[in-house]
Amino acid sequence: MSLEQATMMLELQQLGLTMDDLRIYLDSHLYDKYAIERYNMAAERYANLAEQYSSRFSPLISNMTDSSNSEWLWGLSDFPWDY
């Protein structure tokens, strides 16, 4: 795994944890505008970074694969939980 790939994966993991924590917090603080704003920012960054990662390296989830008829990219790549 290249340094760029590892750096992107680490940021995706950090953003995912941030989103999980904020989701739990927002379950009991429904009107916290600051937390909602932070969640939305993290979710947007995560979506953009996941798209970049998938196009450069490998899909993060099975429905992020391209429509290739000659190879199944999901099965050819390392799985996210292997990092």
Image (tube, rainbow, N blue to C red):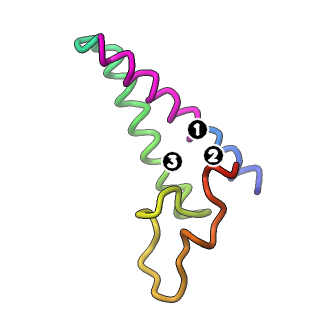
**Which label was assigned to residue 45?**
none
Give the percent coordinates (x, y) of residue 64. Answer: 44, 63
Asked which secondary structure carries label 2, the reply is helix
Give the percent coordinates (x, y) of residue 81. Answer: 63, 49
The residue at 63%/73% (across/down) is: 76
Residue at the spot of label 1: 13
Image-quadrant location for residue 79: bottom right
Residue 5 falls inside the magenta stretch: no
Mark 3 residue type: Leu
Asked which secondary structure carries label 1, the reply is helix
Label 3 environment density (alpha carbons within 10 Å; few <14, some 14–19, many ≥20): some
Mark 1 residue type: Gln
What are the residue bounds of the magenta stretch? 12-28
Q: Do residues under tags 1 and 2 come within 8 Å of each other at their CB atoms? A: yes
Give the percent coordinates (x, y) of residue 47. Answer: 42, 46
Image-quadrant location for residue 75: bottom right
Using the image, determine if residue 30 lies above or below residue 3: above
Q: Do residues under tags 2 and 3 come within 8 Å of each other at their CB atoms? A: no
Mark 2 residue type: Met
Magenta stretch: dominant secondary structure: helix
Residue at the spot of label 3: 49
Residue 16 falls inside the magenta stretch: yes
The residue at 37%/24% (across/down) is: 23
Asked which secondary structure carries label 3, the reply is helix
**Which label was assigned to residue 9?**
2
Image mark count: 3
Quarter of the image that includes the N terminus? bottom right
Using the image, determine if residue 14 lies above or below residue 66: above
